[in-house]
Structure formats: C-alpha cells, structure tokens
C-alpha cells in the first residue's frame, strides 16, 4: 500500500552538508519517490503546531530553539510502506543506540540534534503534511 510521509532534514543535517547523502538514501529505495522538497527556515508557529504534543516536556523549548536555528529541508516522500521504512532508515533518536547503516547511526552525534524527522504513523503523517504542505494534494 502506497503512503505519504513528512520528512525533515533538521538544521544540523543542513549545516553539516548531509542533504545529498540523506536524500540519496531515500531516493535509492526502489518504490519511494520525493513528491515535494523545499529548503525552509521554520518559524515558531509552524514548530509549535508540529511539536504540540511535547509542550511542557523538558526538551520542548530547546528542541524548538534548535529547529529555528537554521534552514531545514522539508519533503514529502511517497511509496510502499514509506512511513515505517523512513523511520527504520533514520534509526533510533539516540545516535549511540542507532545501528551503523542508519542515518543517525552513521552521522548522529547527540540526541537533540538528530538530523532527521519522519512521521511515526499514518495519522501523524496526515497531520504533519497539512502543517508543512497545506496546499499539497
């Protein structure tokens, strides 16, 4: 079943020049396609909507501040089991726990600056895509 997911290459990935490396890993999957891609500096309003479920948690304010710190790449990826697949490709949030071969395992350094975001479910993907690409159909 084909799905769509939101993927963000976070400011640390952009700063470190990893856009091409990460994008190449996504594009190399045979049944996945990038349907939209933008380099964007995310504003607080967008980030507050995106991270709304984390309000009040100790990592919320530093996370929003980090995400505002520079441009991110925002993309829509479509394909067979893409939600589960991109999350597996990204690896666990903690780069020390992430396996070699995953994006975070190969390039991650600290938990908060973990290079990539990918929607964690069909419901999250639908909600997040509307935040970042409201006119995308």
Image (tube, rainbow, N blue to C red):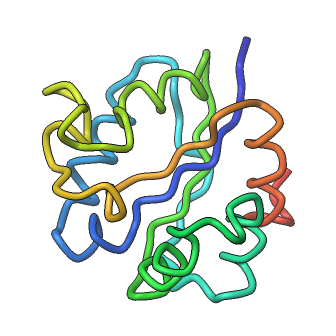
Q: Looking at the picture, how far across and down is residue 23, in whole percent?
A: 34, 47
Looking at the picture, does residue 49 appear above or below residue 116?
below
Q: Residue at x 78, y 71 (%)?
A: 49
Residue 101 or 60: which is nearer the viewer?
Answer: 60
Dividing the picture into quarters, in which one does residue 13 lie?
Answer: bottom left
Quarter of the image containing the N terminus? Answer: top right
Residue 75 or 120: which is nearer the viewer?
Answer: 120
Judge from the rendering whether residue 130 lies leftward or rightward of residue 54; answer left or right: right
Q: Residue at x 49, y 51 (%)?
A: 117
Q: Looking at the picture, how far across and down is residue 102, in whole percent?
A: 25, 31
Judge from the rendering whether residue 61 lies leftward or rightward of residue 50; answer left or right: left
Q: Residue at x 74, y 42 (%)?
A: 125
Judge from the rendering whether residue 112 lies leftward or rightward of residue 5; answer left or right: left
Q: How many dots with numbers?
A: 0
Looking at the picture, does residue 42 appear above or below residue 92?
below
Q: Residue at x 24, y 55 (%)?
A: 20
Q: Residue furthest top?
A: 1
Q: Looking at the picture, how far across and down is residue 81, in whole percent?
A: 61, 17
Looking at the picture, does residue 117 appear above or below residue 48?
above
Residue 110 or 41: which is nearer the viewer?
Answer: 110
Q: Looking at the picture, how far across and down is residue 17, in whole percent?
A: 17, 68
Judge from the rendering whether residue 8 lies leftward or rightward of residue 28; answer left or right: right
Dividing the picture into quarters, in which one does residue 16 lie?
Answer: bottom left
């Amino acid at each position: 079943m084909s799905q769509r997911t939101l993927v963000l290459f976070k400011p640390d990935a952009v700063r470190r020049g990893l856009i091409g490396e990460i994008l190449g890993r996504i594009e190399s999957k045979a049944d996945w396609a990038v349907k939209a891609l933008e380099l964007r500096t995310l504003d607080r309003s967008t980030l507050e909507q995106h991270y709304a479920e984390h309000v009040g948690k100790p990592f919320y304010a530093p996370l929003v501040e980090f995400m505002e710190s520079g441009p991110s790449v925002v993309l829509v990826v479509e394909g067979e089991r893409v939600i589960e697949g991109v999350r597996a490709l990204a690896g666990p949030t903690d780069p020390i726990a992430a396996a070699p071969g995953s994006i975070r395992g190969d390039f991650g350094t600290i938990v908060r600056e973990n290079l990539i975001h990918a929607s964690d479910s069909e419901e999250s993907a639908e909600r997040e895509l509307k935040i970042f690409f409201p006119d995308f159909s």
